[in-house]
Amino acid sequence: MLGTQSGAGFLGAVVLGLGVGYFVKYFRKVKLGKALQPLLGSMIIPFVTLFVFGILTYYVLGPLMGGMMDGMLHFLNTIPPSMKFGAAFLVGAMLAFDMGGPINKTAWFFCFALLDKGIYDWYAIVGVVALMPPMAAGISTFIAPRLFTKQEKGAAISSIIVGATVATEPAIPYALAAPLPMITANTISGGIAGVLTIMFGVERLAPGIGIFDPLIGLMSPWYWFYLALFIGLALNIFLIITLKSIWAKRKEAKLKDEERLTETTGDSI
């Protein structure tokens, strides 16, 4: 209907939905006088909104979003394997970088928008990488407890359990306590896990319940999913412990230098 192969797709639906929402939000503030004001919500807003966005959708938003979806699909279908792995690394790294923040949501949106076009391998990256930061942080507290605070160790079990159901946010407190090592470890391992997911041909059909997705038929092949997750988790844990050990040693050395400088200054005075 819109003159494009894919239609406006999921991307167009989101843009159109947001556009209508903001249009109506500000349209409600219009003052029309006592005679017409009662009709604003029941007749005028629906009619004007339908008219405006009907025209915009057919002539502007639809073709524009449809063209973007066609371009995205063409790119994904014709991308060389080497570039595809590079894109998979970028998507995986973005998903792991800010643990549910805007960068994560941008990568998630890209992957999710492809589901209604029958492209399931990119959304599988979400199903693997989203599990890793909170689970890796929680497991790391048991392997190297000296690197974590009492509060972090107390939250480890809940971080593992909640993280296993595709909720990345439990990893945020660990990242706030040690941003450089934790975010670096998550980002690198997330990117590599994204490459492995594409390389193994894992597919995810719809949003699910994380580590249990293969059991309800949403993730396949199940063995490649668990292998990609295991490798990604192992790498994430290794990087967390390694980088946080280096970070802790440098932080301790810096504190000692500051204490030494304070003592020297005090003696001079």
Image: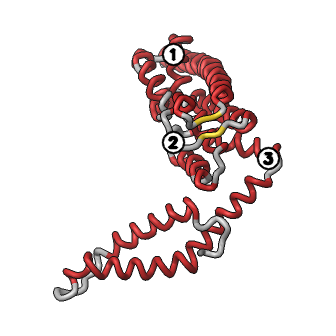
Label 3 is placed on what type of residue?
Met
- Disc 3/disc 2 C-alpha distance (Å): 26 Å
Tell me the crowding category of disc 3: few under 14, some 14 to 19, or many 20 or more residues within 10 angstroms, Cα based.
Answer: few
Classify residue 35 by image quadrant: bottom left
Tell me the crowding category of disc 2: few under 14, some 14 to 19, or many 20 or more residues within 10 angstroms, Cα based.
Answer: some
Label 1 is placed on what type of residue?
Thr
Q: Which mark is residue 207?
A: 2
Q: Which residue is the site of mark 1?
A: 141
Q: Where residue 222 appears, x then y in whole percent?
A: 63, 29
Q: Which mark is residue 238?
A: none
Q: Where residue 7 appears, x then y in whole percent?
A: 60, 67
Q: Secondary structure at mark 3?
A: helix
- Disc 2/disc 1 C-alpha distance (Å): 29 Å
Q: Secondary structure at mark 2?
A: loop
Q: Where residue 210 appears, x then y in whole percent?
A: 52, 32
Q: Quadrant of the N terminus?
A: bottom right
**Count of numbered tags:** 3
Sequence-wise first label, 2 or 1: 1
Q: Where residue 74 appears, x then y in whole percent?
A: 74, 59
Q: Which mark is residue 83?
A: 3
User: Residue at left 50%, top 27%?
Assistant: 164
Instruction: Determine if residue 243 is in view.
Output: no
Image-based side of 223 in relation to 210, left or right: right
